[in-house]
Image: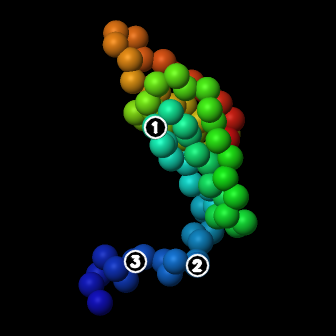
Amino acid sequence: LSFASSLLLPLDDIHPNCSRRLIFASDRLCVIRERKDNSQQFYEFHRRKVTCISLHPQHLIVVSCEEGTPNPALHLWEP
């Protein structure tokens, strides 16, 4: 067992500071997955492919950016 793998939590364990949400992009969609019940919600307001997502440290707001030239669009939204 390597040092790095010994730091990983088992698949079913959740770190106490974890919000139990996973937010990721899939083309024009932002997907919010709840680990507790495996449900999903979608942010569907982008017109082009999402290239970047950032979450506020207190998990209150998300900013996502879509590709675009010369002006990419930024979206602020609540997860």
> Would residue 42 be found to the left or right of residue 7 on screen?
right
* Residue 26 x/y as whole percent: 48, 43
Residue furthest to the bottom:
1
Query: Observer-nearest residue: 22 or 40?
Result: 40
Tags 1 and 2 touching, CB below 8 Å: no
Q: Of the residues tagged 3 and 1, which is closer to the observer?
A: 1
Tags 3 and 1 touching, CB below 8 Å: no
Residue for badge 1: 27
Q: Residue at x 56, y 40 (%)?
A: 30
* Of pointers 3 and 2, the one earlier in the residue sequence: 3
Amino acid marked by disc 3? Leu
Q: Does residue 57 lie above or below 46 as drawn?
A: below
Tags 3 and 2 touching, CB below 8 Å: no
Residue for badge 3: 7
Q: Residue at x 40, y 33 (%)?
A: 51
User: Which mark is on residue 12?
Assistant: 2
